[in-house]
Image: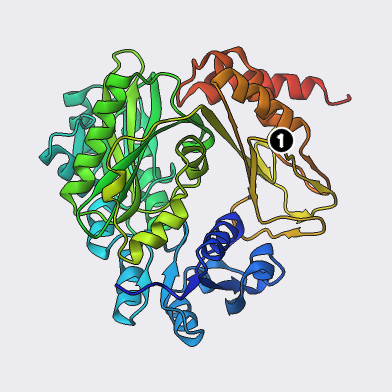
Amino acid sequence: MTAIRRVLVANRGEIAVRIIRACRKLGIESVIAVSTADRASLGATLADRVVCVGPAPASASYLNKEALVHAALGSGCDALHPGYGFLSERAPFERLCSENGIRFIGPSAAAIDAMGDKINAIAAAKKVGVPTVPGSDRVDSAAVARETGARIGYPFLFKARAGGGGRGMRIVRNASEAEAAFTGARAEAGAAFGNPELYIEKYIENARHIEIQILGDQHGNVIHLGERDCSVQRRHQKLIEEAPSPVMTPKLRKSMAGSAVKLASSQGYVGAGTVEFIFDANTRDYYFLEMNTRVQVEHPVTEMVTGFDIVAEQIRIAEGGSLADARRPPELRGHSIECRINAEIPENDFMPSPGRIGEWIAPEGEGVRVDSHCYPGYFVPPFYDSMIAKLIVHAADRRSAIRKMDEALAGFRVTGISTTIAFHRAVIAHADFQSGNVTTSWLERTFMPAYAAASSSEVPA
């Protein structure tokens, strides 16, 4: 397969900047597709060329697959990188790219279909012996949900067949809650993913969210790059990630990573992907959750502990490169933590805080990395996700990484908008986080009530 010459970056924000820099590192030209709201973005400044694909609403720009492919063809691109979110996991988009001779830097439409449909993904995992959470196939009514609850026990989760990220998800703790939860989850799933279908999984109360980064090439090689722990979550949205996981052992890593590689190999998976698991902190059993067929927001922590450039590897794989020399399990060096910095007001239920940035002073130093698209004077638009930066640190061990993260957060100065910087400092200072004793429900159950009370007491009467 020939080398890629020019890539259309079909995304925005920090991931667009990340892709552009990877292209530059590889000597590949980049063309960024922007909406009218992103004409002055950092990505637009860094790319070799800028193409406007539509107005500010994502539905008319970043989700317009025809406009994006037209932009790629019109600017002479021979490949397209979808980043994460938007169209990155939409099989019809990959097909449209392929039909027009544009290399999609990611897995095939068949792999996206197989893993993007959560029920099909669970079936595929079961087929190759990967542990799965007790649950159900498609649930068409609250009555069927109650029958499932009686069979597997309460509490359980309604989950969207076609999506993730917490949308279309509801916890049901007893039969009386099934009707309202089914109606709400179905409506949310339909609005978010265009598919209202739901399925059920047993809800594990004391759970951690651990995921395995994998890479697959066009020659049948699939490797893993270790795990990430993404247990600090709010409303099923990840806020802090780290690698390696504080609860991991060599035996558990070998088993969990082996399951991830086995599943990806069974699908002939090509590209970067993440196999996500729920880890029961009580029993120390793990269960397949889902597979994300794209680069993850939290990929930098894996890069920091393995030395792999995952985005560059995505491009190299799309060019036909081989992973044959990297099949030995990676040596994980030190510890890395990532905080997602959002333009939000934590004290006001994390309300978005768009607006113009005044000062932007990002931390620097050895083992400190900031992935961002922001700069002094940048206007944070109200149309998209509120993440404005990812702050990543790396140190010799977890304790040192926490200390370095606190120092980096303390030195991160942003004015003009509200951010979650101070919130993150409070989270990592908590004794439970310091000891690694957190679960996916810890932030909302334990941390937030105390944080909200402390915040309200600081407001003048």
Give the residue furthest to the bottom: 74
What's under tag 1, amino acid-wise?
A: Ile
- Residue holding disc 1: 421
Please state the horizontal and vertical placement of residue 219, each as a whole percent of the image: 21, 58
Rendered position, 177 above or below 11: above
Rendered image quadrant of residue 368? top right
Q: Which residue is rendered at x = 47% and y = 76% of the image? A: 68
Query: How many badges with numbers are in the image?
Result: 1
In-image side of 246 versus 90 (left or right) = right
Please state the horizontal and vertical placement of residue 160, each as a whole percent of the image: 33, 46
Please state the horizontal and vertical placement of residue 419, each as a whole percent of the image: 72, 41
Give the residue furthest to the left: 127
User: In front here: 415 or 397?
Assistant: 397
Q: Is residue 122 visible?
A: no
User: In front here: 85 or 214?
Assistant: 214
Q: Which residue is rendered at x = 30% and y = 60% of the image? A: 107
Please state the horizontal and vertical placement of residue 147, each as a whole percent of the image: 18, 31
Quadrant into which the N terminus falls: bottom left
